[in-house]
Amino acid sequence: MATIRGEQGAVQFDAAGSSNATVVGTRSWSLTTTKETLDTSKQGDTFRSFVGSMISGSGTVELVYDPDATGQATFLEDVVTTADTADATFELFTTGTTSGTDSVSFAGIITDMEITSTVGELVVVSCSFVTSGAITMNLE
Amino acid sequence: MAAADLNAIRATIEGRLATELASSPAIPVVFHNMAYEPTPNSSFVQCLVSFGANEYLSQGLTTNSQNRIIGIVTINIFSAKGVGSGANYIIGKRIRDLYNRVIVSGVFFDAATGPEALASPSPEGYFQTQVRVTFESIEEL
């Protein structure tokens, strides 16, 4: 058994969806994947039954703001992409940065960006995203 | 991107004080692990830089990652005993102004504490106050 700590994680991103690169300065990420269900219960049944339906995901990435950090500006500013075609690609790593290993990858849209500046604290940024299309999990 | 040079941080902090106290009126200043024999009834300053707990700032282990390095600079100000606190506080203001909320060479100084009068001076025979300033520096790997 090998447990993993959060500092082993990483986020890679490419606004154009061609070549993901590490976003430097990420402090955390989260992803919630949801599968809708369809009720297949019939008259006469005594227990409700379901089949799985559409799968979607959403999550957040939190960063320690650094205007010079590689990949940050592109990531943060993707929220103002107009007519966003969800061409941006994400790969969220639990450990390492080897594509397709210990990660979840998908295309998506950054839907929210909040930057916070507080006296005595580091400036931090929180971005929310939704997935678009397939979510590929390599968490084994 | 490289591991933080703690000696560079220390030099930044100490150098700032040494330069200030070398200007008129000059005050002797002594740092960690340095011998000093004070002149009776005179003023002098002791500066102690300590590094404390560090913490993760970002993900990425040893590459593309950041740590927060936290420390404290403790500055003891000694002045003649039995002549009031004014002379001591004049030095205290010079020192406080050096660090108070200043950012220099990547070292972020917080709001300064003191000068705070100490009931039991060490060494004895002086009036002692203390200025303390916590600081942090971001290590980029």
Image (cartoon, rainbow, N blue to C red):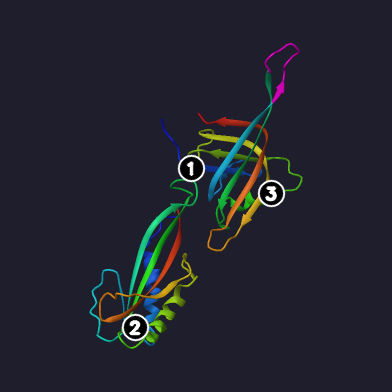
Marks 2 and 1 share the same chain: no
* Residue B131, horizontal then vertical, whole percent: 40, 73
Crowding around mark 1 (Cα neighbors within 10 Å: few <14, some 14 to 19, many 20+) is some
Main SS, magenta residues? loop
Q: Amino acid at mark 1?
A: Gly
Q: Amino acid at mark 2?
A: Ile
* Residue B63, horizontal then vertical, whole percent: 46, 48
User: Mark 1 = which residue?
Assistant: A6
Label for residue A34? none
Marks 1 and 3 share the same chain: yes
Determine contact: label 2, label 1, CB under 8 Å.
Answer: no
Cα separation, mark 2 vs mark 1, equals 49 Å
User: Mark 3 = which residue?
Assistant: A79
Which residue: 56% across, 43% down? Answer: A29
User: Mark 2 = which residue?
Assistant: B27
* Residue A80, horizontal then vertical, whole percent: 71, 51
| Residue B86 on the magenta segment | no
Q: Amino acid at mark 3?
A: Val
Which residue: 71% across, 12% down? Answer: A45
Which residue: 25% across, 72% down? Answer: B34
Crowding around mark 3 (Cα neighbors within 10 Å: few <14, some 14 to 19, many 20+) is some
Q: Is residue A96 above or below residue B100?
A: above
Crowding around mark 2 (Cα neighbors within 10 Å: few <14, some 14 to 19, many 20+) is some
Q: Which residues are magenta?
A: A37-48
| Badge 2 element | loop
Disc 1 chain ID: A
Disc 3 chain ID: A
